[in-house]
Image (cartoon, helix red, strand yellow):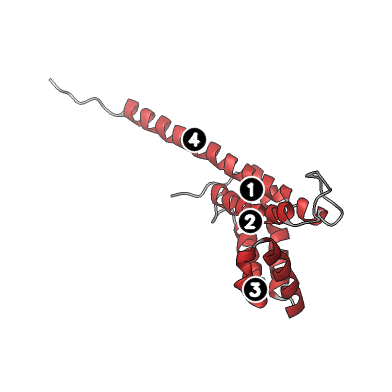
Amino acid sequence: MRHRSRISNLPARVAAGVFILNSGLGKLQAEKDTHEQLHGFASGTYPLLESVPPEQFGKALGATEVALGSALLMPVVVGDGLAGLALTAFAGGLLGLYAKTPGMRREGSVRPSTEGTALAKDAWLAGIGLTLMASSIGSRRAARQERAAKKRAARAKAPKSAAG
């Protein structure tokens, strides 16, 4: 199976990939206090995370970001569809924090509060992820049409058997 990545998607992949990779490296090198803050924020919104030790959570989040950022930066290895799916899932978790954490939105609105702007901006990651997935669908369709055209051309050139 060939991984398909469009050159037109490269700027978006690089922008998101560098940003996420840098964030992940920072979390891997972070102090215990930073991991505790990250864990407290995330577990307040996602109670399932309460049982995970803060340092383990911080390191796992950092490793996830490094893997995702690296995948976005390697379009020859990871195609647009898979990179888009991973990015969209990651962005969904971030936007879930925005939607579920009290104080992130203005009263009675989806618009961010001053505190929520840092999370609301992650909507651009979801947009890039969805774009990569949609682009991948178009690439697969074009590749399928190209293969079918080659088969038709090969059949047209094949010598006719002398059946008699």
Secondary structure, mark 1, is: helix
Residue lying at 74% horizontally and 54% vertically, measured from the top left? 98
Instruction: Tell me the amino acid under the disc marked 3.
Output: Lys
Q: Is residue 98 above or below residue 47?
A: above
Earlier in the chain: of badge 2 and badge 4, it is 2
Dot 4 amino acid type: Arg
Mark 2 and mark 4: Cα distance apart in space: 26 Å
* Cβ atoms at labels 1 and 4 below 8 Å apart: no
* Residue occupying image coordinates x 70% and y 64%: 44
* Contact (Cβ within 8 Å) of mark 1 with mark 2: yes
Task: Please state which of the two labelled residues, at mark 2 or mark 4, is closer to the viewer.
Answer: 2
- Mark pair 1, 4: CA separation: 19 Å
**Which residue bears the numbered disc 2?**
90
Tag shown at residue 59: 3
CA separation, marks 1 and 3?
Answer: 24 Å
Q: CA distance from mark 4 to mark 3?
A: 39 Å
Give the percent coordinates (x, y) of residue 77: 54, 56
Mark positioned earlier in the residue sequence (1 or 4): 1
Determine whether, in the image, residue 27 is placed left or right of residue 156.
right
Residue wearing tag 1: 129
